[in-house]
Image: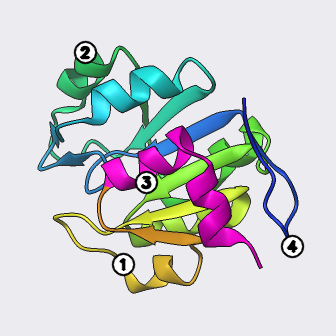
Amino acid sequence: MIEVVVPGRDILAIEHIVLDVNGTIALDGVLLPGIKERLDQLREQCQVHMLTADTHGKQKEVDAALGITATIITHGAPEKAAHVLALGGKTVATFGNGANDAAMFQAAGLRIAVLGGEGIAAALLTAADILVRDINDGLDLLLSPDRLVATLRR
């Protein structure tokens, strides 16, 4: 678990990390550089989950590269939100970039929007706690939690 005390906010106790795949950790179905190394470190503290519609049909390659099997989403936003709620909601840090990630963001304790090569849906911005310029910056926030304190304290 990653525990972060943020002044003016409830303590963050992150047990699960839920990642959207396409546009967040992969571009055109291809895993982005630096992800595997960061997720390997984070898996020592949290359970890591991937949710995807497998838009590009390459999820099996991403799964093999990371040693994690993604959950294939067929019903979009409600299914993503239900997955986060089933994990405990407040104990979940979510990462995404698409409009279909907004509902899972609402269900999570920490919501990090990723501005990557696909851009970011405007609807997601209002649901996010933090916007990062790429996924590696977002994962680094969990690896160096004092950065979360600096950004989120009130």
Q: Amino acid at mark 1?
A: Ala
Is residue 78 at all visible to an observer of this figure?
no
> Marks 3/1: CA distance?
17 Å
Q: Amino acid at mark 4?
A: Gly
Question: Which residue, given by chain and number where applicable, does mark 4 sit on?
Answer: 8
- Asked which quadrant contains residue 100, the reply is bottom left
| Residue 144 included in the magenta stretch of the image | yes
Q: Classify 10 Å Cα crowding around label 4: few (below 14), some (14-19), many (20 and above).
A: few
Q: Main secondary structure of the magenta part?
A: helix
Residue at 23 percent across and 27 percent down: it is: 62
Q: In the rendered image of this protein, does residue 98 appear above or below residue 124? A: above
Question: Which residue, given by chain and number where applicable, does mark 1 sit on?
Answer: 121
Q: Amino acid at mark 3?
A: Gly
Q: Which residues are magenta?
A: 135-154
Q: Classify 10 Å Cα crowding around label 1: few (below 14), some (14-19), many (20 and above).
A: some
Q: x%, y% of residue 120?
A: 32, 74
